[in-house]
Amino acid sequence: WDVGAAELLGVLVSAGAWLCALATTLMSTWLTLSTELLPSESYQLGLWETCVVQELGSMECRPYSSLLGLPPDIMLARILMCCAVAAGLLGLLLPIPGLRLVNGCRPRRARDKRALKAAGGALSLAAGVLALVPVSYIAHMTVVRFFDESLPEMVPRWEFGGALFCGWAAGVLHLLAGALLLTSCARHRDRQVPVRVPLGRLDIGTRTEYV
């Protein structure tokens, strides 16, 4: 397993993870709801707006009126996802100057490149955790409310939307990217450790003299 391939794959996976996290933050399909009373309409709930989708394909979205009126779980998810997008962007940009394929005007020391990749890997791991926490929390609360026996069966319940699955993919990809970058740092460091062989252990052949 080549170090250059590992770090390059880590950056590519980090780019895909960041795009998934950004899409998750902007998508309005965190939760979906459809009722039997109005089968021609379905509702979508996102972090920034709510949408009503008609059966014919038209959609009408309205942003939240105020921050104070947001549900606590939506507010928490919005904050954590914004932090995940910011950390993921830094985790994507920092390792690029530390790649073996990138050569600047001045030769960079291997220690500086390793530090950039390590910082990018740590930020990718943090972005993965920040993305998985709100998505999993919203999914958990949705399951709890879906099976709430205190509500009548005729009351419509929210269900998982596509944004939740995109958020899970973003979190897993961020964790994978961080692991690849940190692994490339460790292997690169192991390669640079010099091997010292004691002179006393060298096998010196016997010298034969002919008269």
Image (tube, rainbow, N blue to C red):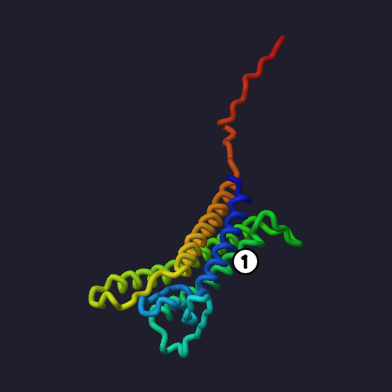
Q: Is residue 31 above or below residue 200?
A: below
Q: Where residue 156 sits: x, y (%)?
A: 34, 77
Q: Secondary structure at mark 1?
A: helix
Q: Where residue 187 sits: x, y (%)?
A: 56, 49
Q: Nearer the viewer, residue 171 or 109?
A: 171
Which residue is rendered at x = 64% and y = 59% of the image? Answer: 98
Q: Nearer the viewer, residue 72 or 143?
A: 143
Q: Quadrant of the N terminus?
A: top right
Count up the numbered dots. 1
Tell me the amino acid under the disc marked 1.
Leu
Locate residue 120: give its quadrant: bottom right
Which residue is rendered at x = 48% and y = 69% of the image? Answer: 163
Q: Quadrant of the C terminus?
A: top right
Q: Where residue 39 sits: x, y (%)?
A: 40, 76
Left or right: where 190 falls relative to 101: left
Left or right: where 109 falls relative to 196: right
Left or right: where 9 falls relative to 33: right
Outermost residue, left direction? 150
Q: Which residue is mark 1?
A: 93
Left or right: where 192 falls relative to 209: left
Q: Where residue 22 sits: x, y (%)?
A: 55, 71
Label 1 neighbourhood size at 10 Å, few (<14), some (14-19), many (20+)? some
Outermost residue, top direction? 211
